[in-house]
Amino acid sequence: MILAGDVGGTHARVALFAPGRLQPAALEIYPSADHAGLPEIVTAFRTEHSDEVSAASFGVAGPVDDGRTEAVNLAWPVDARELAPATGLPDSSVAVINDMEANAWGIGWLDDDDVVALNDVPGEDGGNLALVSAGTGLGEAYVTRGRAGEDVHPSEGGHADFGPRSPLEAELLEWVGRDGKHVSYERVCSGRGIVNLYGFLRERSPDAEPEWLRTEIDERGGAAITHAGLERRDTVASDALDLMISIYGAQAANLALTVMATGGVYLGGGIAPTILPRLREGEFMRAFTDKGRLTEVVERIPVRVILNELTALLGAARHAEVTRAPSA
């Protein structure tokens, strides 16, 4: 069996997979804040599911250096060497990887029911793949495909400089940057980002903020803005959602051109499935294909929304099977 984990600030998913199987043989979800560290969680899982395992990989939100990460959204660091005793495996059979890298590993195991196409074109057989995931933050990764096979690469492209494409976005850049801090794509295209977009547009709007919306924002943050915009219950929230979708499309195409992702672009994270009806209205693809002389190139790139919320867990299992199992 393969031991796999998908570890975030809210929950840690841990599962067992039979080699090559897409459905977990066992899956448990643990509140991250209720535990002192990932070894404690893995020990609890292994107490309940003691099947023999040959390899383990854990996807964790944050940059990973030599098998260790101190993710900003976790109360504790994660280190592959400290995990090994809890798994019952030697150090060499245990890996900690970036969560976006885990998601990218999972793309190869998705089937037709796991995705929805926004740009339904064939793409280039064997072409590189790109992953852009708007959630709490904006994560990116990519897959290169060559003679030696697939190679998965993490990326921190979500923290690249936000590049305005219109006078409105130039004004947005100045407004978000008024605190003197770096304005990245993540600050305008994510769960955090839509709060910034809404605040910017609300300040420009002559309409008073509805009391019901302020109450919901105080309780649920960016999710309240997203849902109010999706349902068009408030004009400013709806405009903020449209602006984020446009920025999302532009940045997805930026990554696609950077890595020449002619095999396809995948939208991961929790936001894209939630706002799928609005994504289908066309603003995302209008921004995606607005690339001047390279428009014809990006028009030929498939764009798909990932619906399977276990993609990172699948990817961690695939990573363990390919790189850490004894037959790898």
Image: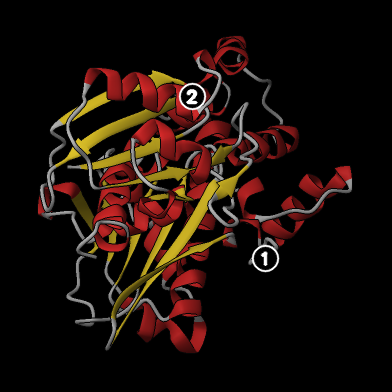
The vertical placement of 161 against 189, above or below, is below
The vertical placement of 290 against 88, above or below, is below
Residue 77, image x and y in percent? 61, 36
Please name the amino acid that badge 1 sits on: Gly
Q: CA distance from mark 2 to mark 1?
A: 31 Å
In front of the other: 104 or 293: 104
| Residue 26 visible in image | yes
SS at mark 1 in the image: loop
Residue 138, image x and y in percent? 54, 49
Q: Which quarter of the rendered picture does the N terminus lie within?
A: top left
Density class for disc 2 (Cα within 10 Å; few <14, some 14-19, many ≥20) is few
Query: In front: mark 2 or mark 1?
Result: 2
Who comes first in sequence, dot 2 or dot 1?
A: 2
Identity of the residue drawn at 18% across and 56% down: 109
| Residue 106 visible in image | no
Looking at the image, residue 31 sits to the left or right of residue 301; the answer is right
Check if mark 2's residue and mark 1's residue have beta carbons within 8 Å.
no
SS at mark 2 in the image: loop
Please name the amino acid that badge 2 sits on: Thr
User: Which residue is the site of mark 1?
Assistant: 163
Residue 180, image x and y in percent? 89, 48
